[in-house]
Image: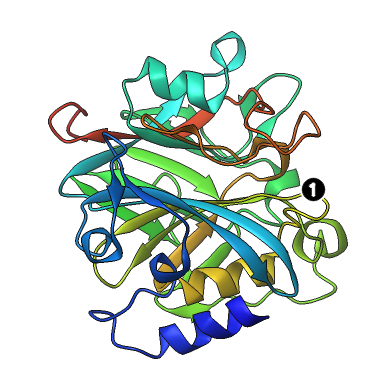
């Protein structure tokens, strides 16, 4: 609870003085080359990654993150359906990324997307399956250097070059989303603690890619959706969207490799990645395509 209290104290300070998450994180590194950053350097950095290890919500947690400014980096949907599916780290390296996070929900047998997905103007999957509607109520919209999290968009999101539908929405313009007992998927998905992945934007123009580890007793408990929402709020995010979680949750950087602890191998290490058919890949503006 001490770490949680420190978060509450820090969030009350002006943002120019303190970022409640960065101030409590472990070693923070520059995104491209991996050089260590001081806190003073970190709050001004266009791209960084790091990990927070400590107690939150009354349990041990491990939270890995990438923070970047869209003017310096471009975020792209990478679709790799069926036989092209691979681990998040491999797909990132294939697309010359400096960082990446797993994407949205998918059919684990066919390795195909089950939520709306548009990659480089091509609609990979045209609609979200009925089975995923209980949690898919938002999307990441990408185009013309803009990254937007949409809580109420209408398919096909015309005018956006890339779209990844996912959910649930965690924060919408600074307001916490509330999901209550009795809704579909409450007991297993919303209320139960799992590894989680999310993307968010803050009031200073940065975008965050975040993975919460879980299923590692004594080291990383994971979070419920309400706890993840509270974490997003305490991090200073104004808009946030949950991505696929569980064994899919993976965060990779060029300088650090797999920086979280994917759980598909049942071990608290970096080797338990799951094969996925979509990711969000981050590239320097000088390398990434203009979308």
Q: Nearer the viewer, residue 214 or 30?
A: 30
Q: Nearer the viewer, residue 150 or 41?
A: 41
Residue 144 visible to an observer of this rendering: no
Q: How many marks?
A: 1
Residue 174 position (above or below residue 149): below
Q: Choose top left, top right, bottom left or bottom right for residue 274.
A: top right
Q: Position of residue 96 (x, y in %)?
A: 31, 21
Front-most of residues 269 and 247:
269
In the picture, which quadrant includes the C terminus? top left
In the rendered image, residue 2, in percent from the top left (x then y), is placed at: 63, 81
Locate residue 227 relative to residue 216 in the image: left or right. Answer: left
Residue at the (57%, 22%) spot, across then down: 87
Query: For residue 16, what is the image quadrant?
Result: bottom left
Along the horizontal axis of the image, is 19 left or right of 7? left
Q: Which residue is mark 1?
A: 215
Vertical placement of residue 81 versus 175, above or below? above
The scheme the figure's colours follow is rainbow
Quarter holding the N terminus is bottom right
Furthest toward the left, the residue is 286
Q: Residue at x 24, y 64 (%)?
A: 205
Could you say which is closer to the camera, residue 130 or residue 20?
Answer: 20
Name the outermost residue toward the top: 83
Q: Is residue 50 visible?
A: yes
Q: Is residue 216 above or below residue 17?
A: above
> Mark 1, residues whose alpha carbon is within 10 Å: few (<14), some, or many (≥20)?
many
Considering only vertical position in the picture, is 171 above or below 127? below
Across and down, in percent, residue 237 comes to 41, 70
State the image coordinates of residue 24 (x, y, percent, origin top left). 47, 69
Report the residue at 30% width, 41% height from top: 31
Q: Is label 1 in a helix, a strand or a loop? A: loop
């Amino acid at each position: 609870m001490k770490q949680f209290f420190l978060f509450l104290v820090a969030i009350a300070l002006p943002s120019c003085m303190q970022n409640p998450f960065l101030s409590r994180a472990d070693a923070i590194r520059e995104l491209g080359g991996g050089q260590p950053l001081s806190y003073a350097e970190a709050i001004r950095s266009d791209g960084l990654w790091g990990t927070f290890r400590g107690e939150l919500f009354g349990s041990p947690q491990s939270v890995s993150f990438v923070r970047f400014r869209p003017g310096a980096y471009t975020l792209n949907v990478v679709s790799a359906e069926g036989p092209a599916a691979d681990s998040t780290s491999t797909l990132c390296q294939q697309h010359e990324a400096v960082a990446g996070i797993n994407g949205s929900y998918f059919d684990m047998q066919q390795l195909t997307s089950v939520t709306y997905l548009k990659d480089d103007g091509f609609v990979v999957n045209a609609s979200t399956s009925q089975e995923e509607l209980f949690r898919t109520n938002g999307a990441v919209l990408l185009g013309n250097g803009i990254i937007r999290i949409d809580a109420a968009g209408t398919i096909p999101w015309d005018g956006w070059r890339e779209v990844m539908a996912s959910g649930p929405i965690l924060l919408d313009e600074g307001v916490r989303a509330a999901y209550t007992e009795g809704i579909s998927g409450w007991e297993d998905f919303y209320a139960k603690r799992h590894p989680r992945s999310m993307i968010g934007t803050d009031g200073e123009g940065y975008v965050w890619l975040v993975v919460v580890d879980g299923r590692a007793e004594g080291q990383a408990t994971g979070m419920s959706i309400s706890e993840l929402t509270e974490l997003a709020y305490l991090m200073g995010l104004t808009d946030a969207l949950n991505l696929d979680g569980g064994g899919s949750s993976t965060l990779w950087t060029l300088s650090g490799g797999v920086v979280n602890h994917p759980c598909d191998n049942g071990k608290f290490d970096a080797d338990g990645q799951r094969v996925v058919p979509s990711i969000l890949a981050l590239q320097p503006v000088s390398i990434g395509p203009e979308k």
